[in-house]
Image (tube, helix red, strand yellow):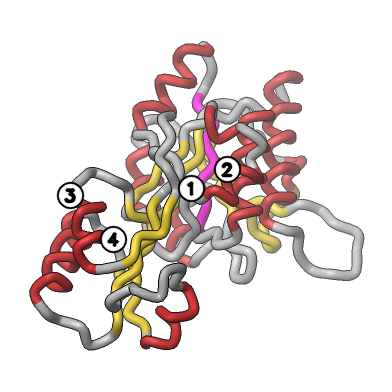
Amino acid sequence: MSRFEESVIEGRNEVIEAFRSGKTVDRLFILDGSNDGPVQTIKREAKKHDLRIDYVDRKRLDEISVTGKHQGVIAYIAAYKYAELEDIFSNAGKKGEDPFIFILDNIVDPHNLGAIIRTANMSGAHGVIIPKNRAVGLTAAVAKASAGAINYTPVVKVTNLRNTIEALKERGLWFACADMEGECLFDRDLTGPIGIVIGSEGEGVGRLIKETCDFKVAIPTCGDIDSLNASVAAGVMAFEVVRQRRNGK
C-alpha cells in the first residue's frame, strides 16, 4: 500500500483540490445551510465518491479546525490508500489458502480498527473490509495501533456492507456474525472460505447485516459484564479460525 501524507484539509478551494487530485477523503464536514458555488462543487464531488456529508454548526467546525480558517468546510484525508476486493482474493491465492476476511460494521474507535488490522495480519486473514460512512477510516492513529500491519493487510472500503457480503457469498464465502445470542463459537465449523463480521463498540452488528450472515456465534464468557471490546472479540474469533484450520476442525 502506498502512503498518503495524512492531513486535515480546511477551506473550500483546498477541499475541492483534494478531491480533484485523487486524495481519498474519509470524512467531510460542511457548515449547515451553506450552499454557494464552491460548496455545491464540493457536494457534487462527495456524491461522485459516495461520501456521506456531516452537516454541522459553526461551533463544531471551530472545535475540529486546526487553522481557524475553515470557511465552513473541513475534510479528513486518509493516511493510507485503500485496497480493492480483488487484492484480498489475490492475497489468498498467492498463499494457496481459502479466503479469510474480516468485515467490520461501523467501528468508530481508531485504536480498535488498528488492533483488528494487526490481529488480521497475525492470524493470516487476507483482508479487512470497512464501510465508507459512519466508521473510522485509515487515520494515523489507526496506522499506529496496527503496529505496521496496515502495510501488509489490504483494507477495502465499500459503500454497502450488505451488498458486499452477498457478492462474496456468491464467490463461496460463509459469514459468521459475532453476536451474544449466537451458538458457541467453539462448536461451529469455521474452516473453508470464511468471513468474520464484527460490530461496533456500542451497538454490535446491525440488524440487516446480521440477517445477511449465514450464522451467529457467541464467545463464551464467565465474567460479570456482558460484552468484549470489539478488537478483543475479533482476536478470539480470528484465532479460533487459525486453530480449526491447523487441526482440520
* Dot 1 amino acid type: Leu
Foreground mark, 4 or 1?
1
Distance, label 4 to label 3, CA atoms, is: 14 Å
What number is the disc on residue 20? Answer: 3
Q: Name the residue tied to disc 2.
A: 143
Secondary structure under the numbered disc 4 in the rendered image: loop
Q: Name the residue tied to disc 4.
A: 51
Secondary structure under the numbered disc 3 in the rendered image: helix
Q: Nearer the viewer, residue 142 or 17?
A: 17
How crowded pointer 4 is (Cα within 10 Å; few <14, some 14-19, many 20+) is rated as: some
What number is the disc on residue 37? Answer: none
Secondary structure under the numbered disc 1 in the rendered image: loop
Q: Name the residue tied to disc 1.
A: 138
- The answer to whether mark 2 and mark 1 are in CB contact below 8 A is yes
Residue 88 image offset from top left, x and y in percent: 43, 28
Distance, label 2 to label 1, CA atoms, is: 7 Å
Secondary structure under the numbered disc 2 in the rendered image: helix
The magenta segment: 99-105
User: Which of disc 3 and disc 4 is earlier in sequence?
Assistant: 3
The residue located at (30%, 82%) in the rendering is 31
| Quadrant hosting residue 201 | bottom right
